Amino acid sequence: MNGRLICVSNRTGTTKAPSGGLAVAVSAALRQRGGIWFGWNGQIAEEGASAGEPDITHEENVEIIAGALTRQEYENYYLGFSNSVLWPVCHHRLDHVSFRRDYVDEYRRVNRRFAHQLGPRLKEGDLVWVHDYHLMPLGAELRAQRLEGLRMGFFLHVPFPPPDTLMVVPDHQWLVRSLFSYDLLGFQTQGDCMNFLHYVLEQAGGEMVGDSRVKAFGRELEVRAFPIGIDVGAFREMTRTAEARRTIRRMRQRNLGRAQIIGVDRLDYSKGLPERYRAFQKLLEQYPETQGRVVLMQIAQPTREAVEAYSDLRQELEWLSGAINGAFGDFEWTPIRSIHRSVPRSTLAALFAASRIGLVTPLRDGMNLVAKEYVAAQDPEDPGVLILSRFAGAAEMMTSALLVNPYNEEEMANALQTALQMSQDERVERHRDLMRVNEETDVAKWRASFLAVLEVVSQS
Ligand code: ADP
């Protein structure tokens, strides 16, 4: 293992107490090898001000280089091209795409600026690992500086759309050509790899030159699936502390023997939340014996509220839960309880452990770590049931969940009823399979396997 690791992601954090899937994943790898973590610090410079030079902090063998975005960059690169074009396109929500030329111009400029700030700090032998849809052209901008002896890999955390969907983005060809500056491309699932390869073969005149190697635009690269997971041991431990046990007991008592169904998501239109609420309503209607016996607890933390689609969604959900509670609830029972904020991870772990059903029904999702966290938090001898959308990346391997079509509310209502009635033996068996997937995709294995391939991949 030689060469420093250079991680580039939209947001940086701290390697000491990282929070969030990506931060946990990269910070352990950075600590192991030493290197640089480069990205946005989450700040926006004052109106009219430039972004300035990034700040550098040292955490042992890791340099964290993080700077602000200008107001214009925030609006056009972050909210604009990244979150109003690429995010909805990758999640099949073409109704939410709003494209403007300013957006893509700024996206290109920010990636170039980052490359100019990072490039001079790189050394021969460094491994560069770029993350996610905000930074697709970063590799091409670094190569343009003619830096010698760099291996560069890119991992896309969100789904890669089928060719027809990607072609909604006017600059689709430029985006895909930019990806050919990397030596290794990692996706969450085999399905994502296939979508990418279809595009390259059908739209870019590319050809396969090995099982997982493709050539186009005069360059070859390796394309593989690396399904991301969670830190299974750490998550399981969180449910075993004395305090967690007390919290779990308290939650159960508060539910008075009612079965709790848990949903935990960012408040995002890709997560299928209105459909989920309506499926729960269908359960109450079609199986009246469930009335008074089940509670849907939904934790939905608002994000990106500056994008209109997100504030509209919050209103829709508040209206919907109010309507369902008004129609079905009584003095002793509130069918849907929703909390619109972030919750500490230890509380989440206890909530998962205290819930009979994990309801994870995104309309489309790169992987979905909540599904894996729910499974890790269960008692193997008396586990709850995971209901999982077929359109989450996690469904490719977690086939022992109850898989559902999140657009089909009736099917979801039936799955809820099946889960409520499932025998302990069947629950134990399904949980065992799902835990196996959790272990196979543990985040430590994920990052080690990506880096192991990046280290040996041949460079064209
Ligand atoms: P996404 O990356 O699209 O948000 P994932 O399911 O892959 O979806 O990852 C979400 C992560 O954020 C999980 O680790 C989950 O526990 C956490 N999370 C989601 N909602 C909340 C919340 N309201 N409070 C705290 N953590 C949350």
Image: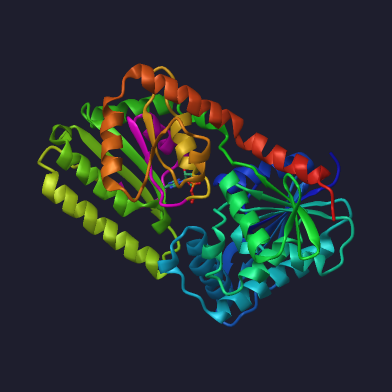
Q: Nearer the viewer, residue 202 or 170?
A: 202
- Above or below residue 236? Residue 395 is below
445 displayed left or right of 433: right
Q: Does the image show residue 69?
A: yes
Is 360 in the magenta? Answer: yes
Q: Nearer the viewer, residue 167 or 242?
A: 167
- Above or below residue 230? Residue 81 is below
Q: Nearer the viewer, residue 57 or 224?
A: 224
273 displayed left or right of 371: left
Give how far across and how far down residue 230 sits, in percent: 56, 37
Q: Residue at x 73, y 44 (%)?
A: 211
Is 413 in the magenta? Answer: no
Q: Nearer the viewer, residue 403 or 80?
A: 403
Give how far across and how far down residue 292 sits, in percent: 15, 35
Q: Does the image show residue 137?
A: no
Q: Residue furthest bottom?
A: 48
The quadrant where residue 226 appears: top right
Give how far across and how far down residue 357 sits, in percent: 34, 33
**Residue segment shown in magenta:** 338-364
Q: Residue at x 17, y 35 (%)?
A: 287
